[in-house]
Image (cartoon, helix red, strand yellow):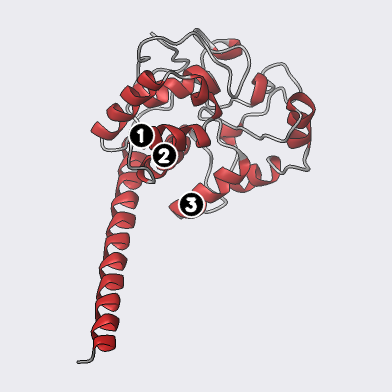
């Protein structure tokens, strides 16, 4: 076999190995997602805490920083509760669903398809957040997932538009996003940067606290562990 033939064979073999690796990673990711949805689906849906997010909830919305020192309870997603959604599955930016501009809107009762429309940058919610922030942001639910990210995660997970944005779905999507973000990085600094690109509130979390939460998340197989509603820092 010529040198060019050998090179072509090696490249083809390498491509085949990478394709097998990618397929196995997708299968493992899908299995984790299925296991999470099944496990959470077996649990009763938690009730909502008191108005304005309950005890320990931030007063603002996406990106609001509480006083954080040591690692908060409930790991990585305890940090999201503390800095983003306040531990509620119906949360909109600034808690506008609770007495604000979108009072009574409960995204946890809506389908993904309905949320794609609701989170349109040109829609009422997108334009309202622009008036508050100076730019369009459409965070929704306990993990404050914005519209574009919501659609990308649903596509990656194979969720249809008629899938309801239940607490179980929200947790599964957040775990999927966190796993993908962390999986793209090889160093602690890279993992922090990837998560901070997904969740604005993590920019206000000390490196040490975020590193510990990432380690806890990885140790639990990239799954969200049960945690109370309205969870805040210890």
Does the rendering let one see residue 54? yes
Across and down, in percent, residue 16 comes to 28, 72
Across and down, in percent, residue 22 comes to 32, 60
Q: Residue at x 50, y 47 (%)?
A: 153
Position of the N terminus, as image quadrant, is bottom left
- Local secondary structure at mark 3: loop
Q: Which residue ends up furthest to the front in the rendered image?
A: 3
Across and down, in percent, residue 84 comes to 54, 23
Residue for badge 2: 172
Residue for badge 3: 159
From the viewer's perspective, tell me whether residue 40 is left or right of residue 14: right
Query: In terms of sequence position, does the residue under pointer 2 or pointer 1 come before the other?
Result: 1
From the viewer's perspective, tell me whether residue 230 is left or right of residue 224: right
Residue for badge 1: 40
Does the rendering let one see residue 226? no
Q: 65 above or below 129?
A: above
Q: Nearer the viewer, mark 2 or mark 1?
A: 2
Q: CA distance from mark 2 to mark 1?
A: 9 Å
Q: Nearer the viewer, residue 22 or 100?
A: 22
Q: Nearer the viewer, residue 225 or 68?
A: 68
């Amino acid at each position: 076999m010529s040198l060019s033939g050998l090179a072509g064979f090696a490249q083809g073999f390498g491509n085949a190995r990478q394709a097998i690796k990618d397929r196995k990673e997708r299968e493992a990711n899908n299995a984790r997602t299925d296991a999470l949805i099944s496990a959470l689906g077996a649990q009763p849906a938690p009730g909502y805490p008191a108005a304005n997010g309950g005890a320990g909830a931030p007063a603002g919305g996406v990106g609001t920083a509480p006083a954080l020192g040591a690692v908060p309870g409930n790991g990585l997603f305890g940090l999201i509760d503390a800095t983003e959604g306040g531990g509620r599955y119906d949360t909109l930016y600034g808690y506008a669903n609770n007495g604000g501009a979108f009072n009574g809107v409960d995204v946890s009762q809506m389908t993904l398809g309905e949320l794609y429309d609701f989170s349109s940058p040109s829609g009422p919610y997108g334009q309202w957040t622009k008036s508050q922030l100076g730019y369009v942001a459409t965070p929704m639910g306990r993990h404050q997932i914005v519209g574009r990210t919501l659609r990308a995660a649903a596509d990656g997970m194979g969720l249809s538009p008629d899938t309801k944005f239940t607490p179980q779905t929200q947790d599964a999507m957040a775990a999927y996003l966190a796993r993908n973000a962390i999986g793209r990085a090889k160093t602690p600094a890279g993992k922090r940067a990837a998560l901070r690109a997904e969740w604005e509130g993590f920019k206000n979390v000390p490196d040490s606290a975020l590193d510990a939460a990432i380690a806890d998340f990885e140790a639990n197989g990239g799954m969200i562990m049960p945690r109370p509603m309205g969870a805040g820092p210890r």
